[in-house]
Image (cartoon, rainbow, N blue to C red):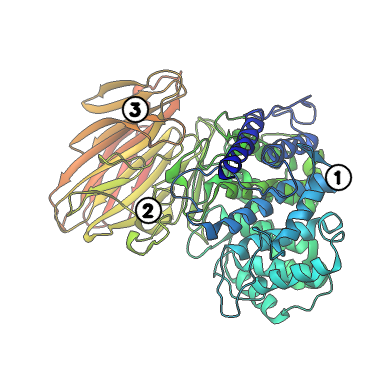
Amino acid sequence: MKKKFLTFSAILWLTATLAAQTHSNTFEIREPDYQRSPLSGMTRQHWMDAAHYVLEGAFSYIHTMDDAMKFPKQHAITYPHRDNQVPTEKLEGLCRTLFVAVPLLKENPDLTLNGIRVADYYRHQIGLLIDTASQSFITPRAPSGGPNQNLVEFGALAISLMSAPEVLWHPLAADQKEALARVMLSYGDGPTVPSNWKFFNIFIMSFFKSQGYAINETLLTEYLDKSLADYRGQGWYNDNPAYDYYSMWAYQMYGMTWAHLFGKQHYPQYAERLVANFNDLQGNYPYLFDRQGRMIMWGRSISYRFGAIVPFPLMGFENRPEINYGWMRRIATGTLLQFLQHPDFMQEGVPTLGFYGPFEPAVQMYSCRGSVYWGGKAFLGLLVPADSPFWTSTENNGAWDDELKPGNVYNHFQQASNILITNYPNLGASEVRAWCHERVAKDWQKFRSTENYNRLAYNSAFPWQADGANGEVAMNYRVKNDAGQWEALRLFTFTGFNNGVYTRRAVLETNEKVSFNLADVPLPNGILRVDQYTGTVPAEFRLGHYALPKLDKPITRETRKIKGTSVSIINNGQYQLALVLVSGWSDALTADATGLHPQSNHSTVQMVTDRCNADAALPKTYVTLMLWKDANQSFSKDELMPVRHIQHDANTKLVVITLKNKQVVKVAY
């Protein structure tokens, strides 16, 4: 009997695997419309096609109504690790794929995938959540129980129920509705986490209020007040304590969606404030994306990827004349295609846990394979009416065509959050500098102290490389600590942004006698770094440029001397990077790495090194140029050495750098 069961299980697994393999690894745009969308060819219908493509892969695992949205595990760090985590894993797959399914079902309630009627499947699976005999049954929160992942997923389910009640809620039997209300409200009417999680409680209680259920309105308004208190300005919420994409695919998306679906009718004053906060992002968030609309690899949960674009279509809920909707759609579509047309994005019919392909350093312990469908929030933009200007405007490159001129660099500083967004028209790239001040010792989930946050900058053209066991580092410092290990800087304190110079102080976590003053000066073709070692003990450290992945051919290396200054250049056929030791450094090295880069198993990074004997009265200054260009463009001598003169003012403690174009950079820490 056991042998037969295993054989049958193997057949089911093989059937699902074969079905997944027939799902194309890249999305194909059929009948592109280059009149409406001259850059991408993508219209609203193509967005619908993209949602269908993503959902079709998930349904390759569904052969009967009882089959759960449970997908092949990827990476050791991810859950489930125990059998009692499997119901939550299934709940994630169910509720998150619904983000993709809802807009499709609203337009086609009879949608069928893999021989399964999609609406019937989701209603059946919702019923299993409240069936005590089902392996998918979710236990209600105990009166003394705290918040957990079930709250998150029920919050997501509430968004889908609120978005398409005619498909998901109204057809349920009365006893199912009562049972679902009991279990979901046991979580919603309860404690939460002081972060974007408050919105999960808000959506659960709001949905059931909209259906006539009594809810805890005092708690609902308390969580609304606390969510609004997290707002800092210029479109950014603080997710206790970080700034990242959670401001956008969580706070801003939740606020605008809640206001549109529920708040304007029931709590207009709260809705008005949330919409006003949403409107703030229009002046800066679009600049975080590059000329092709590609997003930056930055922050935790990066496997949610194009969830970051959801604010752009949601702008279509309001027809505001100051918004360039054609640019907003260009950005949103560009990010969708950044991943949907990348050959490593899909494996086994399911998006991978990583950035492009699987990449464990960017994955957190709270994720399972189905977590990736949180990115499906992007498709909730399809709830915006088809006649919205977001869909009808002609696609265009916005500021990249009429504002951001080649030969220049443009900084957008967000004073409320100390975020700096920089645009580089020569390369068409965007870059961000933001908060990081988290100790490994206190970071029990091990993500806010890591490369997800502790890089000096994050660039759309150069996804971050993980630190290596041999001291490899990209776009950060690593210091050899007292244990003989290479330790990355992560305790940064912002000190100012003045005249194009972004300054921070940093101390080493394991020894705060090791400290630095850091200054970033964006230039048209890269970054001028003017840093100081301010520690009171000797220290050995290294600083890395961005890393290049190996693509179709080997990475080439070149060394030059420009008036006695050492220049290292690497080229991977797509981009080239130059590292110039202007002053202070004793040596440079170029290191190949394996398994550290999100785009390729092989990569190369350039680093500069020194061992400094501390002198608190006279900090040692290090001036470094980190430059870039397209692979087929050559660097001129003036581009590789734009610095004419460096002066240290002992009285004002200023470092004054005069460039050959007569620009004077004054660095004050």
Residue marked by disc 3: 640
In front: mark 1 or mark 2? 1
Amino acid at dot 1: Glu
In terms of sequence position, does the residue under pointer 3 or pointer 1 come before the other? 1
Dot 2 crowding, Cα within 10 Å, few <14, some 14–19, many 20+: many
Dot 1 crowding, Cα within 10 Å, few <14, some 14–19, many 20+: few
The residue positioned 49% from the left and 34% from the top of the image is 461
Residue marked by disc 2: 503
Amino acid at dot 3: Leu
Query: Distance of mark 1 from mark 2, alpha carbons?
Result: 51 Å
In terms of sequence position, does the residue under pointer 3 or pointer 2 come before the other? 2
Circle number at residue 107: 1
Q: Could you tell me which quadrant the C terminus lies in?
A: bottom left
Give the left or right position of residue 34, taking residue 88 as reference: right
Instruction: Label 2, secondary structure: give it.
Output: strand
Instruction: Label 1, secondary structure: give it.
Output: helix
Q: Could you tell me which quadrant the N terminus lies in?
A: top right
Q: Residue furthest front?
A: 1
In terms of sequence position, does the residue under pointer 1 or pointer 2 come before the other? 1
Amino acid at dot 2: Thr
Number of numbered labels in the structure image: 3
Give the left or right position of residue 195, taking residue 377 as reference: left
